[in-house]
Image: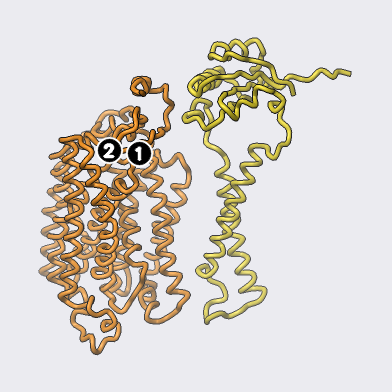
Chain colours: A orange, B yellow
Amino acid sequence: MKKSMSTPLDLSRWRKVPLLLTAGGGLVALLGLLVNREQFAFSWLLAFMFFLSLSAGALFLVMAHHLFDAGWSVPLRRFLEHLANLFPWLAVLFVPIALLAPTLYQWMSLDPHLDHALHAKQPLFTRPMFYAVAAICFGVWIFLSNRLRHWSLEQDRSGAALPTHRMRFYSCVGIFLFAITLTLAAIMWMKALQHQWFSTMYGVYYFAGSVWMTLGTAYLITLVLDRQGVLTDTLHDHQYYFLGSLLFAFTVFYAYIHFSQYFIIWNGNMPEETFWYVLREKGTWWWVGMVIIFGHFFLPFLALLRIDVKSMFGFMAPLCGWTWLMHYLDLSFNIMPVKHPDGFVLHWIDLGCWAFMAGLLTMIFLREYGKHPPYPLKDPRLVEAMGFAHPIPTQISGGELDECDDTPAVHPEVQGGRQ
Amino acid sequence: MNNAPKPYGIIAEFRTAADILHAAEKVRDAGYQKWDVFTPFPVHGMDRAMGLKNSKVGWFAFLGGVAGYTTGMLMIWFMNALDYPLVVGGKPMFSPFYAFPPSYELTILFGAFGSLFGMLFLNRLPRLYHPLLKNRRFALVTHDRFFLVIECADPKYSEAQARKLLEEAGSRHIEMVED
């Protein structure tokens, strides 16, 4: 257990912010829809893909937790489960994209017999398949996130081993379904804006950026919940360090994926591939690309190299906020050049759509978080997260005696239970 | 001529990992600098108990990595764009993109060299002789005993005080080691 940081912050002033964002953003977005339908469609898609990243990243972290049989991330799992359970609401937010799809996706109004690139992508790039893919993706995500949270809450009540086994089962099956559906979603909703293009990296590329930004968010949420004393008793020094290390790992992973995509296209030098990047090197998009190289990779990479900075809150909090800015810019780099080929534009409808979704999803998240216990109360590995060793091998730990980074005699009361 | 061997330090034997951990905390708090702990296996929390700071090896690895990346870029630029300009696939004579994979490999290679040789340098290795190797009981360190050694070269060292401290820390067997 770690000591509490200091007095809780007074967050009552912020209580109305999500509602104001929803109302204000909703009005702006509605006005945008009436004034400029095409711009609204692109702005909405950008905001939607941004918040989809958060839920997808959270679902991945929950499943990774179970797949690796992790101990340290138990206290963080509950808010990640709630973030992942925003999928039903994201499905609702997808409705405008489904309705405006013909405005967004040029391929929908093309004849596949006259367009070779489109013909080669039959039958995936047909209208029925577009809607079927959306239904399958949301079906899988809602099912997985719902089951994982259901059994997690069930364990809060029963404390039995069964929920852990169930969650492992859903994670094992889910990770494959997740990989396929997220790739499909990135292809159908973002890459299909320029349907002629192809890149096998694209699904992983969206995934890498999504988890990166989710880790930054998870760090900030943990920090706030720790400061408020909600999670303090369940945390140990290593949660922040591990979150920082994962953020560091995904900084490198994202750069590796994006560089590989660019490098292969640059080296191959074929017009049917290069046109995607040629468009993104025109006008101020060139500078956006530079900001992504240096701000999305070099800055966090060099900043996170040192082992001790991962637990320095004054340093990490701004960096985690930075991940939001960079991920937004990265998605804008993917989506917006189709609408604004001359350069980067931050449209007022962009801000409206983003504010609306941010406010709405925050309200739902806070409501859900408040309704349930703040962390998995009876998870058998909670004791490890707190920095104690298992006094006896458990059914869940597979009979191993797990090590912790503390010395045995520091917690004599726990070691006294050794048999 | 004085052939009497010089003392190297005082060695104390402990029976359990917990004992030596607390002994290390005591020696750390007493303010000794030139001392070390020898255990048959890694003891968790020992770094903190000994008051060890983060290793400096990381700096050697970082500088090695930077040197490797720079070497790779400069080498490829020199060979392909300056010394023997060669057009390949209509590409520019030099671009950081195609030079990246080899430069990256050199980053890793030199980084690994930096950490390996930096570690050897900081540990003053290789070293073929160590005074402790003459101590017969010390051989048990590879089996089930834990040892703590305070060197005579420590500025705070005095045999009586060190012996008293180690006895208080719970050591049952304390002896002097000769150089």
Chain assignment, label 2: A
Residue A54 pos. (x, y %) = 25, 54
Q: Residue at x 18, y 50 (%)?
A: A147
Quadrant of res A178: bottom left
Q: Is residue A380 left or right of residue B109?
A: left
Above or below: residue A33 compared with residue B172: below
Residue A360's mark?
A: none
Q: Are marks 2 and 1 in contact (CB under 8 Å)?
A: yes
Q: Amino acid at mark 2?
A: Pro
Q: Residues within 10 Å of mark 2 (few under 14, many from 20)?
A: many
Q: Say whether residue A120 is visible.
A: yes
Q: Residue at x 25, y 50 (%)?
A: A169
Chain assignment, label 1: A
Q: Residues within 10 Å of mark 1 (few under 14, many from 20)?
A: many
**Disc count in the image?**
2
Q: Amino acid at mark 1?
A: Gln
Between A36 and B8, the residue placed more toward the observer is B8
Q: Residue at x 56, y 72 (%)?
A: B94
Q: Is residue A59 left or right of residue B69?
A: left
Q: Is residue A194 left or right of residue A242?
A: left
Quadrant of res B76: bottom right
Above or below: residue A330 compared with residue A69: below
Q: Residue at x 47, y 30 (%)?
A: B44
Between B106 and B2, the residue placed more toward the observer is B2
Above or below: residue B35 compared with residue B92: above
Residue A188 pos. (x, y %) = 24, 70
**Pointer 1: what residue?**
A239
**Pointer 2: what residue?**
A75
Residue A136 pos. (x, y %) = 18, 64
Report helix, strand or loop for mark 1: helix
Residue A120 pos. (x, y %) = 29, 82
Between A77 and A251, the residue placed more toward the observer is A77
